[in-house]
Every structure is written in C-alpha cells, then in structure tokens.
Amino acid sequence: MKHLFIVIMSLGLIFSPALGQNTKKPIKVEVRKEGNGFKLYRGGKPYYINGVGGQKFLDRAVSYGANSLRTWGSGEAIAVLDEAEEKGLTVLFGLWVGQERQGFDYDDSKAVKAQLEAFREVVRAYKNHPSVLLWGIGNENDLMYSDYKVWNAINDIAKMIHEEDPNHPTMTVTAGLDVAEVQLIKERAPEIDIYGINTYGGLIGIDKEIRSFGWDGPYIITEWGPNGHWEVATTKWGAPIEQTSSQKAASYQMRYEKGIYADQEKCLGSYVFLWGQKQETTPTWYGLFLESGEETEVMDVLEYCWSRKWPKNRSPHINALKIDGKEAIQNIYLQPGTTCSIMADVKDPNGDEMDYRWQILESEIGLTGTGGDAEVVPDPVKIKYTEKNQSFSYLKDNFLSTGTTGALKIKAPLKPGAYRLFVYAHDKNGNVATANAPFYVE
C-alpha cells in the first residue's frame, strides 16, 4: 500500500474535493458528426477551441480572444476551475497518467487499479463544474515506452469517465503522430473520443497524416509552437539553434492559418504552448512571456489569429543577432579573453525606444530533460564589456543592461567550452524581442 500511495502522489492525484462541486450544473459538451467531418458543441452551440497551454495571465488570454486553457494534471486543473469560470474560459481537464519513462509499471496491476480509482474520485468530484470542457487522459505516454498496455489502461480510464460523466468527451495525447500509435489507440483504446496531438515543426500537413494513418475521428492540436529543440539545426558541438522571437512569430501565423484553422472538417481547435515561461533547453524557447510577464512578437500574431485584429502597440522585431559578424548557424568560435563585437538588429514598428539587456549562460548540453521534464537554468557568466559607458550596468543573474545600445564589444569568457549569448530588447511597453547565439570558446 505504501508503494501505491507513492505512485498516486507522484501522479498529482491527492486532492481535497471542493465542497459544493457536485451541486453545480454542468454544461454539456459533445462531438457531433456533420457530413464528412466533426464539430464540437458546448451547451448546444458550436465551440471552436482557441486555447492556451498554461494557467498564468488569463486576463490577457481572454482579452486577446482565447476561450479555453489546457492543464496536464488534476491538481492544476482543480486549482484553476473557478477562476476560469469567472473569466468565461473552459478547461481541458488533464489527468496525468503514469509514464513508463518515469517509473510507472503497467505490469503492476495494483498500481494501475489505484490510478484508475483515484481518477474516478476526481471525475466524480469535478464532473459538474461548468468550466470543464474535456477530459485529457495522459500526455505523451508514447515517449520512451515499450509496454503497450498503457493504452489499455487509458481505455479503462476513458470507459470509467463515460460511465461517470455523460457530459464531457475523452481525449488522449501523443507526441507527434505515428501510424503505429494511431492503430494501437484505435485497437486498444476505442473509448477515446478525440485524438490529441502535440506537434511543432511538423504541424503543417498533420491533417493529411492523421487521415492517412487511419484515424477517422476528430482531433485537437493540444500543443503547438516554435520549431522544437529536436527539430532544428545544431552547431558543430551539438547546440540546437533557436529561432528568434520574430522568426517564431512568422511560423506561428503560418501554422495557425495553414495548419490548424485550415482543417475545419476534423480539427476542433488547438492549445498554444506555452502560455507562460519555463526553462526548456533555453529560458526563451517555448514561453510566450518572459518571467516578468513581458510578451514577444508571437503574441501579436496570436491576437490577430484569434480576433483578426492587430494590437495597437506592436512588439519589437529582431532581424539578427551577430557575434563578430556571424549568426548562430555559422558556428561561432572564440578564443579565451579575446575582444569580440556583438550586434542586435532590432526595429520597433511604433518607433518605441529600445532598452537592451544581455546575458551569457553556460551550455545547456547535458542538462536538458525529456518531454518537458523540469530543467535547471545553466549558470550565468558575467559579461565583461570594453566600452567606458556610464549607462551600462549589471543587474541580477549577471544581466548586462546597455540602455539604448544594441551594439557593443565584450571579452570572450576565459573558461573554454560552450555558451549562449542572449539579447532581450524591451520596448518599455510590455513587449520584448529575444534571440540567442550559441558560441564556443576554444
């Protein structure tokens, strides 16, 4: 029993059902087949999902045109239900299904049953909350796994939900799309109503793939965003090359308009990732905000995609970040302690004055996780600049503030190894442009 308790704790399933939840009146959600396609209905009205993955900055999500938010585990879903209701948002209620790569054993029948029964209590407690939209059963349980019984367990959870809650469909989510997994879910988890797909660089064309792989039901893009760190070119020493915030903005717009919204037949909508900030390969790779809440150019694009209106004050646009005239793709090598020139080419559509901040981090190689697992931010390195400029100053975490100066000379670190140089160009109106360039000190 101690083992089962630890398993349940690790899944985030220990909770205290809120008093009065079962006295609330649910809003029925259903998938209807219409012609050759499907539509999602909520309260009898068509409901297309323009969703965010995350629970922060929900007022902004609403003001920009979002209508739903995604959670991954029951604890975070429970915590946000009432706030979502107040703001008119629905919740994709995540149930974090145990993952093989994290030690869950699907040959352990007691652990599997304990997981199912814990979810049953969650469903019973919260099925009537009016903010619940769907039940998301598991996330990327196909990562680094070999035991196909996970799909049988997911099917049992979906079947239980259908028995307990007739008002909300079920969904499971895979990392990308694979013909074998589509067939496994069809064969082993027929109680799943909607297929959820986390996809990044491969989003365009996913509509054709899911059909050709044999899924004839509806689907939702449950995570989407920039090119993933596993999908991009790398330097000679193995550092993945991140898109600038402006390159990301262009790809988000294309992926929404030509990928997600273009499939009105079977795609029920999407959840953009990440509506917040986190360290995943870098501190800027997936988050649409800085930790301070400032927004990148991607947010302009999302507001336009959701509302068909551009914001009045647009985010700065970054054309390039260069070290000694080279961009990241050119494999930047430096000698220890030598002077090098750095330059960020940034333009602001509104003519706002820029405030530049710089940071060098040691390499993240060897520190990255899998499937969004928690990561530690690499150590920051103090930037030694050569100019005598009284407007330059050091901030917390070895950030160097250079005010309106977007070009300067610095000394390369003395310690050999891999690094990243980051630039943050703030417009003083809550917007920021970001870019980084990996470099190697020989």
Image: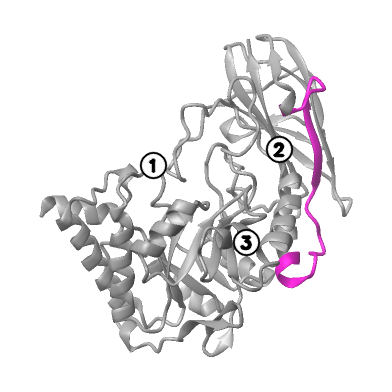
In this rendering, would 322 be left or right of 378?
Answer: right
| First in residue order: circle 2 vs circle 1 | 1
* Residue identified by numbered label 1: 144
Secondary element type, mark 1: loop
Q: Which marked residue is nearer to the observer: mark 1 or mark 3?
A: 3
Say which residue appears at 79% left-offset and 69% top-offset.
309
Secondary element type, mark 2: strand
Q: Amino acid at mark 2?
A: Ala
Residues under labels 2 and 1: Cα distance?
Answer: 31 Å
Q: Which residues are magenta?
A: 304-328
Q: Determine the residue located farthest toward the right in the rendered image.
A: 351
Q: Is residue 306 magenta?
A: yes
Residue 117 has which mark?
Answer: none
* Residue identified by numbered label 2: 435
Q: Are marks 1 and 3 in contact (CB under 8 Å)?
A: no
| First in residue order: circle 2 vs circle 3 | 3
Give coordinates of residue 88: x percent, y percent: 55, 79
* Residue identified by numbered label 3: 207
